[in-house]
Amino acid sequence: MAEKKRPLIIDCDPGIDDAECILMLQGCGQFDILGITPVHGNVSLDKTSANALYLNEKYGINAKVVKGADKAIIVRHPRAEYAHGDTGLAGLKVKTEDLTFSEGYAWDFIWEKAKEYEGELEIAAVGPLTNIALAVLKHPEITKMVKRLVIMGGSTTFGNVTEYAEFNIHQDPHAAKIVFEAGFDLTMVGLDCCVNTYLDEKDKKDVVEAAQGTSVCDVIEDFDRFEDESIDNWPITEDKKAYYRSHKVMCDAVAAAVCIDPGIAVLSDKHVIVDVDGKMTIGQTVVDWFGFSGAPNLHLAMSVDRERFVNMYLECIRSYKEGE
Ligand code: BDR
Ligand code: CA
């Protein structure tokens, strides 16, 4: 008998690695993807929403696409066109004239599905946490009605937009604080963990090869080409640029892998605090390693099995073979 699919909502800001994350969550075949809820982030909401609509169609998902927040609750921090292109998807201008958004707002949609699926709903949140925080503020009982929330965000060490802060948390630190303190069954897949779960040169070639003859071949090739070129624009030193050219980091896809199979990660229960008012450290996720803060509030991914991740990604790509 076919196994029952796990109900899932993907909250995201596509974004190249968001697109790779969605590709995995659909390609693995385990999920009934009920909705995609775009949020502001890598680019503006109108662009992340158009990209979500396009990817929903492109990957044959058939989910509802329900728009979310167009800005953070309080702060206004720069977006990430330098890494994802002007449109958010490697410069790809998506055509969405024939596609439609579902009515309503992301936070109400998520709440409705949490109720409807009676504690079985899972959420993968791989953008700023504004939509999820608004769901908590408006429907506080939601935290007990969601089975698992897996986020890509934060870091236990370095940041990628400031010395201390990771992009998704830095975009809306106040939202992140609300979500971290709300009482979800929360898994944090942070930047440092994702950076160590890279694709090397051979893996990158294997990905392009695996994509041949699939319905996602064009997007995979576009992303590959764009990323190699766009690294020139990253605000980092030349030696780091050289490193990232041969080590492809795809943060949101790593979170997807943890969502698919938590056994791929080493998880440790910790209390993590989001700094919302530090002058240098706003958006930092501060891990209480010593145990000052009482009970843990999340499962922290300490590492992810890189080889298993790469194989999982390749398998997911192959699932898009045309005619199969
Ligand atoms: C995160 O920031 C975004 O640019 C990516 O899509 C990912 O979600 C990595 O810090
Ligand atoms: Ca993202």
Image (tube, grey):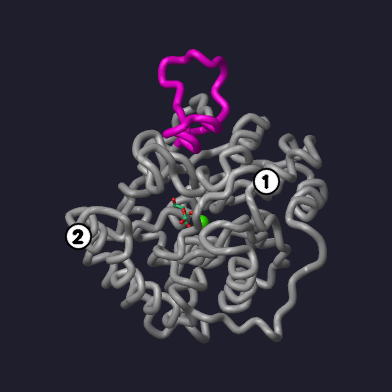
What is the quadrant of residue 98 in the picture?
bottom right
Question: Of tags 1 and 2, which is closer to the observer?
Answer: 2
Q: Residue at x 71, y 62 (%)?
A: 67
Instruction: Identify the main secondary structure in magenta.
Output: loop
Q: Amino acid at mark 1?
A: Ile
Q: Residue at x 69, y 68 (%)?
A: 63
Q: Which residue is mark 2?
A: 242
Question: In the image, residue 149 lies at what x, y percent?
Answer: 61, 43
Given residues 56 and 178, the one toward you in this image is 178
Direction left: furthest residue: 239
Residue 126 within the magenta-colored segment of the rendering: no
How many labels sit on residues?
2
Q: Which range of residues does the magenta coloring cover?
A: 274-300
How busy is the neighbourhood of tag 1: few (under 14 within 10 Å), some, or many (20 plus)? Answer: many
Q: Is residue 112 left or right of residue 292?
A: right
Q: Secondary structure at mark 1?
A: helix
Q: Secondary structure at mark 2?
A: helix
Residue 4 appears in view: no
Q: Is residue 265 above or below residue 316?
A: above
Residue 296 within the magenta-colored segment of the rendering: yes
Residue 279 appears in view: yes
Residue 319 circle label: none
Mark 1 and mark 2 lie on one chain; the one further toward the N terminus is: 1
Question: In the image, residue 288 lies at what x, y percent?
Answer: 45, 21
How busy is the neighbourhood of tag 2: few (under 14 within 10 Å), some, or many (20 plus)? Answer: few
Q: Residue at x 44, y 44 (%)?
A: 166
Q: Is residue 112 left or right of residue 8?
A: right
Q: Is residue 205 left or right of residue 100?
A: left
Q: Is residue 182 above or below residue 133?
A: above
Q: Residue at x 74, y 77 (%)?
A: 100
